[in-house]
Amino acid sequence: MIRLTSAQFDAFVRGHGRVACLMHRGGPGDHAASLARAVAERAGDDGWAVAEIDLDDTDDIAAAFGLDRPGTHLLIMRDAVVLYCEPLGPDATPGRIGTVIAGAQALDMARVRAEIEQERNARAIHAHRACPTTWRTR
């Protein structure tokens, strides 16, 4: 597992189709360290690029993902699309992490992109319906 900085993050994501990152503030605790090993084993076996990010050193990444609380979070991305970004609480187990990674692996990314595009289009239509004055200011 490699440790990423802000400067390396974008290139790492672009250079790898499947990315699993453990993100934490400060050093990961014992539970998080054992989960890190589980992520590295499961994701690495399936060809995922695995990384660690210390959010104390990468405020811009923390802000981009809305991670302002302490704790360890698991970030799963495919083709630069965020599929999962959730905290790993005390109930997190290697088996649950394996299930998340397997679920992300099984997704049809063409369908995911189509759903994202539909949501963007729906928001754009709603924004134009929301207030006619917004049309004049664009």
Image (cartoon, helix red, strand yellow):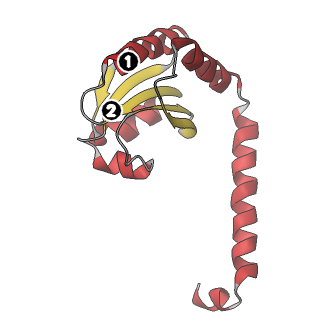
Foreground tag (2 vs 1): 1
- Judge whether 118 appears above or below 39 on screen: below
Q: Residue at x 59, y 84 (%)?
A: 138
According to the picture, the residue beneath numbered tag 1 turns out to be 31
Q: Residue at x 29, y 48 (%)?
A: 59
What percent of the width, then of the height, locates residue 104?
64, 26
Which residue is nearer to you in this view: 62 or 14? Answer: 62
Taking the view exactly as shown, the residue that stands out farthest to the front is 90
Which residue is nearer to you in this view: 95 or 17? Answer: 95
Quarter-of-image position of residue 123: bottom right
Which residue is nearer to you in this view: 132 or 13? Answer: 132
Left or right: where 67 falls relative to 96: left
- Tell me which numbered mark, 2 or 1, is placed earlier along the sequence: 1
* SS at mark 2 in the image: strand
How far is mark 2 from mark 1, CA to CA? Answer: 16 Å
User: Which amino acid, mark 2?
Assistant: Ile
What percent of the width, then of the height, locates residue 83?
60, 36
Badge 2 crowding class, 10 Å Cα cut-off, few under 14, some 14 to 19, many 20 or more, is many
- Judge whether 111 appears above or below 35 on screen: below
What percent of the width, then of the height, locates residue 22?
40, 28
Quarter-of-image position of residue 5: top left
Q: Residue at x 57, y 40 (%)?
A: 81
Left or right: where 36 falls relative to 54: right
According to the picture, the residue beneath numbered tag 2 turns out to be 53
* SS at mark 1 in the image: helix
Q: Residue at x 29, y 42 (%)?
A: 6
Quadrant (top left, top right, bottom left, bottom right) of the N terminus: top left
Left or right: where 11 falls relative to 89: left
- Judge whether 99 appears above or below 71 on screen: above
What percent of the width, then of the height, locates residue 134?
63, 86
